[in-house]
Amino acid sequence: MFESGSSVERIPILKMGSYLLVTIQVDMHDRLATSLQDDLTARIVETRARGVLIDISSLEVVDSFIGRMLGNIAAMARVLDAETVVVGMRPAVAITLVELGLSLPGVRTALNVDKGMELLRGSVERVAKVNSRGRRQARDA
Amino acid sequence: MAVVKHETREIRSAEDIVLVRQAVRAWAIELGFRLVDQTKLVTAASELARNIVDYGGGGTVVIEALNDAERRGLRLRFEDHGPGIEDVDTALRDGYTTGGGLGLGLGGARRLVNEFEIVSAPGRGTRVTITRWR
C-alpha cells in the first residue's frame, strides 16, 4: 500500500488567489503529516498566501499526532502572517477528539469549505483595514 | 466470555499504524459498533500503536472479538518488549511525555474505551489491553 521510505508521496496544496487549499483525502501516516506541515509553511512563504484552508472532511480519524500537526500548521502560519481554518470535521471525529483531550486550541474551524472561505476572507480583510488605518495614522502623525 | 475470532499484527513503522487503524475499523464494523464507537476504538488503537513504534521499538497487537452471554466486544492487546515504563501513573497523566508528543496517548486511549489495563516494568516491555463493548 505505502512504499516504505517513499518521498514521492505528498498531499497536494492548491493555490487559489491569496489562499492555499489543502484537502486531506488519505489516511495519513505520520511522515506524510509531517511533510504536509513542512510543505505548507514553504508554500505560504513562496506564494505570500494570506490564508490556509484545510479540508478534513474525508478524515475518519484524527488522533493526537494529526491534531498536533493541525495545531502546528496554524501556529506556523500565524507567525508567517497567514490565517488557518480547518473545515469539514466529521461529528464522530469531533466527539472522539474532545474525549481524547484534544480541543485544538488556536485552530479555527468552520463547518464546510464555503464557511471556511468566508471566515478567511473576513479576517484577512479586517487585518488589511486595520493595517491601512495604522499607516494612515502614522502618515498623519 | 469467549474469544470468537482473533488476529495478530506486527507494528514496526508509521505505515503499520495506518494498517492497524484500518484493521480495527474493519473489525469494529463487522461487530456492529456504531460510527462514534468505531471512531473511538480506531483512535485509541492509533495512539497505542504509535507508542509501540515511538517508544517500544516495535511490537504486536492482538485483535479479539469477544462474546459473552449478552454482549459483544472488541479487545485489543498491544505488546512490546521495549524499555518499559518506570512510573505508569505518571505516564497516564495528560500532558506527560518523554518524547515530542502531546502526552495524550495513554490517558486519551483510556478515556476512549470501557476497559483499560496496563502492565509494564523497566526493561520488561509494556502491555496495554483495551476493550470496548457494544
Image (cartoon, grey):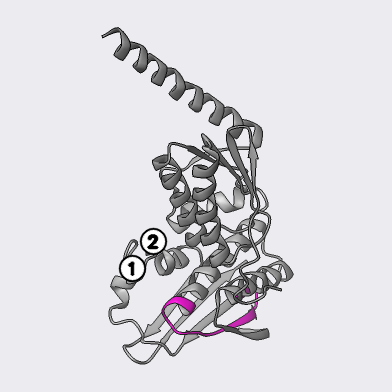
Q: Is residue A37 above or below residue B65?
A: above
Distance from label 1 to label 2 (Cα)?
7 Å
Task: Assign the N terminus of chain B to one quadrant of the image.
Answer: bottom right
Q: Residue B72: x, y in percent?
A: 65, 73
Q: Residue A34: x, y in percent?
A: 51, 61
Name which residue lies at 40% across and 66% down.
B107
Circle 1 Cα neighbour tier, 10 Å, few/some/many (<14 / 14–19 / ≥20): some
Are labels 1 and 2 on one chain?
yes
Q: Residue furthest left?
A: A141
Magenta part of the chain: B53-74
Query: In the figure, is residue B97 to the left or right of B67?
Result: left
- Residue denoted by label 2: B102
Residues at marks 1 and 2 touching, judged by CB atoms closer than 8 Å: yes
- Label located before the other in sequence (1 or 2): 1
Can residue B71 be seen by looking at this rendering? no
Name which residue lies at 54% across and 47% down.
A43
The kind of secondary structure element at disc 1 is loop
Circle 2 Cα neighbour tier, 10 Å, few/some/many (<14 / 14–19 / ≥20): some
Name which residue lies at 28% across and 71% down.
B90
- Choose between A86 and B47: the one closer to the eye: A86
Q: Residue B36: x, y in percent?
A: 61, 56
Q: Quadrant of residue A14?
A: top right
- Residue denoted by label 1: B97
- Choose between B55 and A91: the one closer to the eye: B55
Task: Assign the C terminus of chain B to one quadrant of the image.
Answer: bottom right
